[in-house]
Image: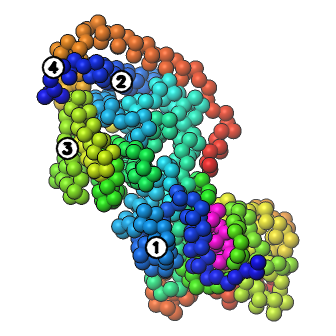
Amino acid sequence: MSSATRSELGSEAAVERWLRAYRQMLSIRAFEERVNDLYTRALMPGLAHLYLGEEAIAVGVCEALNRDDYITSTHRGHGHCLAKGAAPDRMFAELLGKEAGYCRGKGGSMHIADPATGNLGANAIVAGSVAIATGAALSAKRLGNGRVTVCFFGEGALGQGLLYEVMNLAELWKLPVLYVCENNLYTEYTHYEETTAGEIPGRAAAFGIKSETVDGQDVRAVYAVAAKFVAGARRGDGPGFLVANTYRYHGHHVGDISREYYRPKEEEQHWKTERDPLKLLGSWLLKQGLADEAVLARIAAEVNGQLDAAVQFAIAAPYPNPEEVDKDVYA
Amino acid sequence: MPDRELTFAQAIREALIEEMRRDSSVCIFGEDVAEAGTPFKVLAGLVEEFGSERVIDTPISEAGFTGIAVGAAMTGLRPVVDIMFGDFITLTMDQMANQAAKVHYMSGGKWKVPMVMRTTLGATRRSAAQHSQSLHAWFSHVPGLKVVLPSTPRDAKGLLKTAIRDDNPVAFFEDKMMYRAKGPVPQEEYTIPFGVADIKREGRDITIVATSSMVQVALGAAGLLEKAGISAEVIDPRTTWPLDEKTLIESAQKTGRAMVVDEGYGRYGVAGEIAAVIAEAAFYDLDAPVKRLGAMQVPIPFSPPLEDLTVPTEKSVFEVAQELCR
């Protein structure tokens, strides 16, 4: 967008797009803050891996997708699901194990899936969904339905052999799939440089897959590159590989609080103050005159109200009946 | 119409051809499945009829193409993946046990995974420890998977057609030593439902439950037992999941004695599970403990005289049965 002309920036569609992106990133931010709150107040069972700090990637990529395009997600998947169109109330209901959740409470935080928004499912096995995403791309190509699949994964998945098996196949068969590697620097509690030999884009290059590395805190940059790859995949150009450099504000999961042994607080502070995706987009919108403080404040108020209501819905929602326990084992 | 004689391999090929003609979403992928028709030639001629869009050669990436089948099955295709040797299912275990088996349940019943994994089992092909195992117990353990073990050409065809039409992930194990075995197969269209055991031979004195090629071994042993004055009933469950517990239990209650013959390892296996099902339900009708007969608990050796010691035979089944009926 940096090379866009003034009129393009000011076009109604562009204004709408970046205000929508702002609202969506803010929704994810507000969602995850409430997850943290629910969890620490012992209202949420299980595990919670927060996407705080990485919002621009899910939103920038999904902004380039149609509703019937597919995504696969990860254990850190709330942002992907919301960006693809999931409703916060049914998301929270799933996180609390309630019948009204996307998976009737049987999946939980790490397994949100929703055919209505093309979400093939979040996956709690690292790299567990890379083959599923590639298979969905195979279907789309065979059936000729023009759908593209985006496969989100963290840099931790680079250690799994399955990823390279399916990247090989995706390029051989020219499948419409975009691999999005979110490099938040930490593979659980270990800096990725301690776990990753060579360069990340070199992995794509080895298979002849086109790749680009992008500032994952800049939603406009993410969108621009994702849109290019998605359009190419839809045209039949085959797979793409997008490396988005980002940062995980919180720990590996909500319980990972004392983190100084693997990363300094100053580093966290730097990303939060200097590289925050919401601040970056917000100040750009203001600078370009596409929004004023009042507009952004109104969006924030609307989002916070909506998310508070979603939490209340989930808390009030009933648990599944006991007879649900052995339903849906087989179709 | 009278039945024809087909080999086990021909029956499987015919099932695939019929289902691929019936439903354009059925496709095959695996190593050397197209022009090569697999090393066992089970798929010979399929790529010529259905094209390389539907009969797809893959790299040697069992986990990769199995997982791709899961994703493809969720989104409109009905893949039949070919895992050349059953020993290689270990490479696919996460995609089968953690993904395929759980997608339907984890999504609250929204996504389905209508896929079939065809693979092999069985020793005595002189293929040594990594090409000879019978690992169907591994998949039988996991809720969400169905597991099929045909023992005749007729069953193989009817069960494979059912597997392809099923909306769940199905593992279909073929004993590679049976591919050339012949048997009657109906001319007309038919399918065989899962979870329905077949009484292969009726008898009064002992129930022999057997799976896959062990059914033929058990039938041979039943012939020997007959000469010794013992009437053996041979039952083939045909699917380990769903399992037709009722037929197995009723037979054991009738005969008062039961043994289970399965080519998987004897410990923690299919034979043990079926023996427990019978013992739990028919205990007070039994005159003897339920016996298990499985593969010897060693990695399958290469040397032929050693390998032959590791699998149940007509003789060993006969001896165990005779002992039970003493």
Q: Quick check: is B154 in the magenta stretch?
A: yes
Quarter placement of the C terminus of chain B? bottom right
Q: Amino acid at mark 1?
A: Glu
How crowded pointer 4 is (Cα within 10 Å; few <14, some 14-19, many 20+) is rated as few
Up-down: is A92 above or below A169?
above
Q: Amino acid at mark 3?
A: Glu
Q: Could you tell me how far apart the alpha carbons at marks 3 and 4 are, in whole angstroms?
A: 26 Å
Residue shown at 58%/35% (left/top)? A104
Q: Could you tell me how far apart the alpha carbons at marks 1 and 4 are, in whole angstroms?
A: 58 Å
Find residue A28 and report its horizontal and vertical position in percent.
37, 25
Dots 1 and 2 on the same chain: no
Up-down: is A13 above or below A204?
above
Residue shown at 36%/68% (left/top)? B60
The numbered dot on residue A212 is 3
Q: Is residue A162 left or right of residue A314?
A: left
Q: Nearer the viewer, residue B250 or A117?
A: A117
Q: Are marks 3 and 4 in contact (CB under 8 Å)?
A: no
Q: Could you tell me how far apart the alpha carbons at marks 3 and 2 are, in whole angstroms?
A: 24 Å
The numbered dot on residue A6 is 4
- Judging by the rendered image, the residue that carries numbered circle 1 is B48
The range drawn in magenta is: B148-163
- Judging by the rendered image, the residue that carries numbered circle 2 is A24
Dividing the picture into quadrants, the one containing residue B244 is bottom right
Find residue A160 and report its horizontal and vertical position in percent.
32, 54
